Image (cartoon, helix red, strand yellow):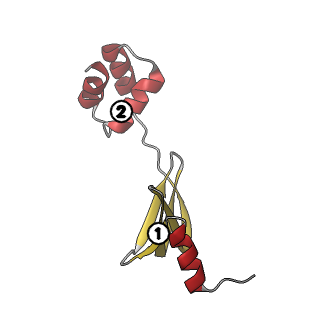
């Protein structure tokens, strides 16, 4: 049985599902630890199903590798010693503090 758009909309409404187009979207960016996914000329629909929001995105996809910031061994060691943390935690704090040593130490010690 094939459903028309009108029938499908009515059925979704009866099930408590609301779908609407988000106007004016130019680009959607999804960031992961290793890469960014840029979706240009995006058409985005929001589906609200019983309080859960789901976004459907369609467009031109481009994957871009994320540039990992590097920090000097001295900065990493200083954060490790001052905050008494592992190297991994020191690097994570420096990344979050955008390389500012003092801010990284404060974040870890307060």
In 3D space, how far apart are the residues under numbered discs 1 and 2 (Cα atoms)?
A: 43 Å
Look at the numbered disc 1 and give the secondary structure of its residue: strand
From the viewer's side, name the closer residue of 73 and 101: 101
Mark 1: few, some, or many residues within 10 Å (few <14, many ≥20)?
A: some
Callout 2 crowding tier (Cα within 10 Å): few <14, some 14–19, many ≥20 = many
Q: Which mark is residue 18?
A: 1
* Residue 58 rendering spot, x and y as whole percentages: 54, 73
Q: Nearer the viewer, residue 18 or 21?
A: 18
Sequence order check, earlier mark of 1 and 2: 1
Snapshot quadrant of residue 98: top left
Give residue 15's quadrant in the image: bottom right
Please name the residue that numbered disc 2 is placed on. Answer: 94
The residue depicted at 30 percent of the width and 15 percent of the height is: 82
Q: Is residue 23 left or right of residue 88?
A: left
Please give the name of the residue rendered at 55% of the width and 85% of the height, measured from the top-left corner: 6
Q: Secondary structure at mark 2?
A: helix
């Amino acid at each position: 049985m094939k459903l028309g758009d009108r029938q499908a909309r009515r059925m979704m409404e009866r099930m408590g599902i609301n779908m609407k187009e988000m106007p004016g979207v130019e680009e959607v960016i999804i960031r992961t630890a290793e890469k960014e996914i840029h979706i240009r000329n995006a058409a985005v629909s929001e589906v609200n199903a019983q309080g859960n929001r789901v976004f459907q995105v369609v467009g031109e996809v481009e994957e871009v590798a994320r540039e990992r910031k590097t920090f000097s061994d001295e900065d990493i060691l200083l954060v490790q010693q001052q905050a008494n943390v592992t190297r991994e935690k020191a690097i994570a704090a420096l990344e979050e503090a955008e390389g500012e040593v003092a801010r990284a130490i404060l974040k870890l010690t307060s």
